[in-house]
Every structure is written in structure tokens, then in C-alpha cells.
Amino acid sequence: MNGFKNLLCYRFQPAADLTTESLEEALSAHPFVPCGRQELQRSGWVSPCPLADSLVFSSNGYHLVSLLKEERILPASVVRDELQLRVHKIEQDEARKVYKKEKDQLKDDVIQELLPRAFSKRQSTRALLMPQQGWILIDASSFNRGELLLNALREALGSLKVRPLAVNTAPASILTQWLQDANQIASGFEIGDECELRDTSAEGGVIRIKGQPLHSDEIVAHLESMQVTRLAMTWESQLEFLLHADLSLHRLRMSDQYQEQLEQDRPEDELADFDASVARLGLEMSRLLPDLIHCFGGEPASE
């Protein structure tokens, strides 16, 4: 299995009867079906494993699922140009003005006629459910995409109590401290060579730095009026990622050293290899997330 490239972290309260079987049954009622001729988009559940047909792949108590979204590509400029042609023809042929209400109807007609000829784009989004740890982890770079999967999961399960990861101390302030003083960096973490600084004043200027030593005097001087909002990091010499101030992780990857180590013990059987990858992802996140949360003062007390 290809590892997650991004990470959005959500806390959830799993139902007492959440099992592989119950989750499979729930998702099976909402499978992916391609867009009809007159539909702009559709989404549904597909198998997360190319070697199996089931909609849930479970390993060591972790459940991997995948939502597939299909969207018709109908550029607004194409609709606008066709609409203008039709409006112009009516005004010329009938010597009258076409007003908004009629334009809106004409626009709907144009969209319905063009949809069957439009190209389609498909995008899958994976999520790892970790009931014992109370996590739903989504491989997505935007929270909008994460919410699409959560809404689909909520629809399938009937209810879903979920909230984005929250911490007691603003991540930007801690990341800024780490750049100001290398001794402040939490144990187990190392800083990379990339960051984003954002002006705390009303002007809101942004500086992006890559491929430079981040503790240089020049960069530290900027921190008098700016905060770190993105920072490249390595955890336990195993995982590398770009941490954003909203607690999302981007460009998540295994370090070269860790990758070489895993290759030596990689199962030859493809399904066993996939199973091991899912289990490893769950175990890694079970260790990384508590360490990360600890850096920012822990989570707020539950209401």
C-alpha cells in the first residue's frame, strides 16, 4: 500500500458495535456508481485494496476505507460562451431583451445539453479508522475534501461524532519558539530546511524559505514580527512531513533510512504486504500523534 501523503486528524467516538462487518455492511449501502448523463458529480465507497473486493480492509484493529468522487468537467467559460450565443440569437431573432430569469433557464438548458459530452475526473480519498485510539485519519490536503469523506461516512453510519484535532497551545507559537531556540525543540523531533513565516501585523506578509539552515540569524530576526505557520520536520528518524499551524501534515513520507529498513523485511506476498502496510500506518500514527499533541500542551478537556 502506498502510504498516506497528507494527514488530517479527527477525534471520534466509535459506536460500541463498530466492527469490520458492521462497517462493511454500512458502506455497502452506498457504493460508488458512475455519474449519470445529467449529473455533475457523484461519490461512493470503493475497495481501498486493489487485491480485494471488500469496502473495508482491516488489520490489527485499524480499518482502511476509500471514497471515490467523480466530477464532470464543464468549464464555466464554455457554458458562458454558449449562453451568450443563445441570448444573442433570441434578441436578434425576436427583437427583444432577454432578462435574468430567462437567462437562468437558458443556462440550465445549456448545462444539461453539454453534460453528456463533458469529461469526467475521478479522485479517491482514503481514511484510516482507529476505533481503539479514537482517531479518523484522512489522506487529504484540504479540510473540504476531508469533510466530504466524513459526511459520506456519517450518511453510511447514520451518525458520527467527530471533531478536528485541537490542542491547548497555539502550534504557531510553539513552532516559532523552536526556530528561535534549538534547545526548545521537543525530544524525538528534528527541524528540516523548509518553513513559512507569516506577518502577525495587519499587513499579513508571508516569507517562504526552503533549502536553508532555519536557525540562521537572518531568519531568526524575522521572528520579531512573524510567526512560523509551516515547518518541515522529522520524527524519530522515521517520518518526514511539513507541519502546518492548523495541525495538518503534508508531504508525509518515510525517511530513506526507514524505507531501506522496511524493504529488508517486506513480505513477498502482495496481500500480506498490503496488510503489513495498513498495520504499520496505524502503529506509527498511534505513536506519532501523542508525541505531537504533547508538544502543544495536550488536548483540551472533553466537555
Image (tube, rainbow, N blue to C red):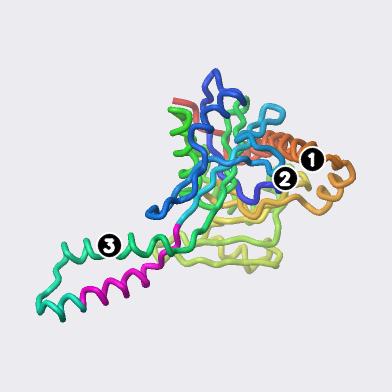
Tell me, for residue 264, which label it has, or none.
Answer: none
Q: Which residues are magenta?
A: 72-88
Q: Is residue 298 magenta?
A: no
The image position of residue 191, as x and y in percent, is 70, 54
Is residue 253 found left or right of 296 in the rendered image? right
Assign the N terminus to one quadrant of the image: top right
* Image-based side of 2 in relation to 68, left or right: right
Asked if one can make out residue 166 in the rendered structure from this viewpoint, the answer is no
Answer whether residue 87 is magenta in the image: yes
Residue toward you, 219 or 119 = 119
Q: CA distance from mark 1 to mark 3?
A: 51 Å
Residue assigned mark 2: 1
Callout 1 secondary element: helix
* Residue 124: percent from left, percent from top: 57, 49
Q: Are marks 1 and 3 in contact (CB under 8 Å)?
A: no
In the image, residue 108 sits, relative to residue 158, either above or below, namely below
Are discs 2 and 1 less than 8 Å apart at CB? yes
| Residue linked to disc 3 | 109
Q: 233 or 95, which lies in front?
A: 95
The amino acid at mark 3 is Asp
- Residue depicted at 67% across the width and 27% down the height: 61
**Amino acid under disc 1:** Asp
The vertical placement of 8 against 209, above or below, is: above
x and y, in percent, of residue 252 in the image? 67, 51
Give the quadrant of the C terminus.
top left
Q: Decide which of tag 2 and tag 1 comes sooner along the chain.
A: 2
Q: Residues within 10 Å of mark 1 (few under 14, many from 20)?
A: some
Residue that label 1 marks: 273
- Residue visible at 62% across and 28% down in the picture: 133
